[in-house]
Image (cartoon, coloured by chain):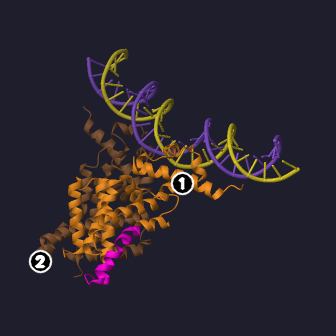
Chain colours: A brown, B orange, C yellow, D purple
DNA sequence: TAATATAATTAACAATGTTAATATTTTTCG
DNA sequence: CGAAAAATATTAACATTGTTAATTATATTA
């Protein structure tokens, strides 16, 4: 019987990745450290280094999974709508809500330094373009029904990305505005302004 | 002779604050630690704790000074303009440039966790409202010459704040877009869209 | 089944923030 | 002035964390 090294290694990596995700979603980024991850994975902390360059690499590997999860959440929240302005707004709100629900994931996407992998890593680009992906169909629909020309759609795309990141940054990291209610009201206002008051 | 304790203490605090500012502007936040600050201040690292609750408190005390410096920079860059749309745009560009020049200051304002003081501290609010302060006169001018009504001005204010923070976050922390030139072009485009193409 | 390769663990180190214990300086006041 | 008391500063020490080195255990091979 020839052992499947591939499979074994990929399982081992999976245990550490899974542990990392759990901690990020639960206790958050502050609670994430090699020892905590390894313990939850059921191995010693040094073993982690046989499968990942370092903790930083490991933590950014989780980004993809969280993007998928966030995307599902956004889908769920907007199933009933047709692509277009209204759905676009709802989708951006869902995107924002996802991160407020999981501060640790917000920190991972936007705050945590990318050491090992360098910020020019595909992961950085994926984070940057994530809202584009979420809003693609709606922007296309808006262009389709001549609600916006191509250039405007591009500007909206850009504005949604920046505004969402900025709002989340202030709210999650600086508690501004200072309550969830107020924050979400401001967010709606911001989105309405970007999308036009139609 | 009765010694002026007030003055002595305020000088001591000043030495540490000055050292902290130098490190932040120079080597950046990553290089900032108790021992480095104390050495530059000319004291032992434990002495710092006689004047500040902890390093986190000390570092956020610098925010005010940097805001003043940034404001001066913005003034310098826009002296020749009259208050109004064009100057507003220039001022936001200057604001953005200031932070790209000093990554450590960007991290202090937007990234660094506020531990000791809690995010509801006045400092957090000051950071949040900083762009409001910088753009106040121009927005007033635009309302004055009926270029925008009050509600639009308020929406612009909000949008500038969020867009600037978002763009800086992506550029400084995720290297997106991936060169300074491209970044500044995108920023101009974003600002033009928010301010209207007039 | 012994030798070798592989993988996992414990030990160790460096960096950092913080506090405790000690030393030094300054102030007070007989 | 000069000792006692108060204040301030310094060094030692500790805890946490990331990472690597040394060691042990496990699996593979011949």
User: Which chain hosts label 2?
Assistant: A
Q: Is residue B139 above or below residue B72?
A: below
Confirm whether circles 2 and 1 share one chain.
no
Question: What residue is rendered at 52% in x and 51% in y?
Answer: B16
* Contact? badges 2 and 1 (CB < 8 Å): no
User: Which chain hosts label 1?
Assistant: B
Quarter occupied by the N terminus of chain A: top left
Quarter occupied by the C terminus of chain A: bottom left
C-alpha span from label 2 to label 1: 60 Å
In the picture of the structure, the residue carrying the numbered disc 1 is B14
Q: Say which quarter of the image contains residue B67.
A: bottom left
Q: Secondary structure at mark 2?
A: loop
Q: Judge by depth and name the residue closer to the eye, B59 or B65.
A: B65
Q: Secondary structure at mark 1?
A: helix
Q: Is residue B169 magenta?
A: no
Foreground label between 2 and 1: 1
Picture coordinates of residue A29 (x, y %)? Answer: 41, 54
Q: Judge by depth and name the residue closer to the eye, B108 or A179.
A: B108
Q: Is residue B131 magenta?
A: yes
The residue carrying pointer 2 sits among few (fewer than 14), some (14 to 19) or many (20 or more) residues within 10 Å by Cα, namely few
In the picture of the structure, the residue carrying the numbered disc 2 is A146
Question: What residue is rendered at 34% in x and 72% in y?
Answer: B135
Picture coordinates of residue A120 (x, y %)? Answer: 25, 49
Task: Tell me the magenta residue range.
Answer: B128-154
């Amino acid at each position: 019987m020839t052992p499947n090294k591939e499979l074994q290694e990929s399982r081992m990596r999976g245990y550490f990745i899974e542990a990392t995700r759990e901690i990020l979603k639960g206790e958050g980024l502050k609670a994430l450290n090699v020892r905590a991850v390894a313990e939850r994975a059921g191995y010693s902390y040094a073993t982690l280094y046989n499968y990942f360059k370092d903790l930083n690499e490991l933590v950014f590997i989780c980004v993809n999974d969280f993007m998928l999860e966030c995307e599902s959440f956004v889908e769920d929240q907007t199933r009933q709508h047709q692509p277009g302005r209204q759905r676009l707004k709802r989708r951006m709100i869902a995107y924002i809500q996802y991160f407020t629900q999981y501060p640790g994931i917000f920190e991972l996407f936007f705050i945590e330094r990318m050491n090992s992998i360098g910020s020019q890593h595909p992961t950085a680009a994926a984070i940057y373009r994530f809202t584009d992906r979420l809003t693609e169909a709606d922007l296309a629909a808006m262009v389709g029904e001549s609600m916006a020309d191509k250039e405007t759609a591009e500007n909206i795309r850009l504005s949604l990305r920046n505004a969402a990141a900025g709002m989340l940054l202030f709210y999650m990291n600086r508690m501004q505005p200072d309550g969830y209610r107020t924050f979400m009201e401001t967010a709606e206002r911001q989105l309405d302004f970007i999308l036009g008051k139609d």
